[in-house]
Image (cartoon, rainbow, N blue to C red):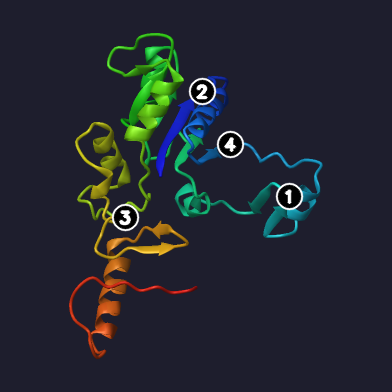
Amino acid sequence: MQAAALIGYKDSGKTTLALELCKRFKELGLKIAVAKFSHHRLALEGTDTEVLSDYADSVLGLSEDRTQLIWNSKKYLPDLTGLLQADVLLVEGGKSLAYLPKIILADTRQAIQELDSGMTLGVWSEHDVPGYTVVREINDLARMIMEKGFMLPGLDCSACGRNDCAELAREIVRGEASARECQARYSSLQVTINGTQLPLNPFVNAILANGIKGMLSSLKGYQPGQINISLEA
């Protein structure tokens, strides 16, 4: 899944840009998911959902054309991406996220530098900004996200040789590394559920891999090679 965060100060046009990108990606036949970060309580006022959410731990809403799931606890974006089933993830806000690249919406160099954490793919602005790639056309921005967007699992496991996901993400944005260096996603053992891969830190990876190989090695017909296991959960 290609991913990027649209970040900027209040009223910088993040939602407008997200809508334009959604339209463009839909024209390309892609499935798009959007995650929106908010510093305020999510708007439920005056609805049955609000009443239910005051008492239930989670609320599921189903209609003919929409599904809504609300947890009364904080969840983290990497833990939810498996539910999205999208080709592209646009994140509105999330300035502090350290595992995916950013598109900055700002018109002054000072504002851009304040928002820049070393993971900036480009700047959406009408003005030239020395030291940054400025994008003005929606087609160019969509192409940039498809070519350079990514999302690391946010485990900070250091299996890639970096201190955390942020360090690897900065190197990827600079063109000095590849997302395939993430050992939590690209290792000898890969586990997928309903087509979505689960990131595994080195400890869990080793426990599962050694356990599976150890059990299978006692079976008649076992020989070293690629192992494929299908399991209905």
Residue shown at the point (25%, 48%) measured from the top left: 180
Location of residue 148 in the rendering, given as x and y in whole percent from the top left corner = 32, 34
Which of the two discs, 2 and 3, labels the residue nearer the N terminus?
Answer: 2
The residue that appears at 53% across and 53% down in the rendered structure is 83
Circle 1 — which element? Answer: loop
- Residue receiving disc 4: 38
Residue type at numbered disc 2: Tyr
Q: Cα distance, mark 2 to mark 3?
A: 33 Å
Mark seen at residue 185 = 3
Say which of 178 and 7 sits in front.
178
Q: Secondary structure at mark 4?
A: loop
- Which numbered marker is on residue 116? none
Image point (67%, 60%), residue name? 57
Within-10-Å neighbours for mark 1: few <14, some 14–19, many 20+:
few
Compared with 6, 88 (above or below) is below
Image x and y of residue 160, in percent: 22, 51
Q: Which one is earlier in the sequence, the residue at label 3 or at label 4?
A: 4
Q: Nearer the viewer, residue 68 or 76?
A: 68
Element type where label 2 sits in the image: loop
Residue 157 left/right relative to 95: left
Q: Is residue 73 left or right of residue 181?
A: right
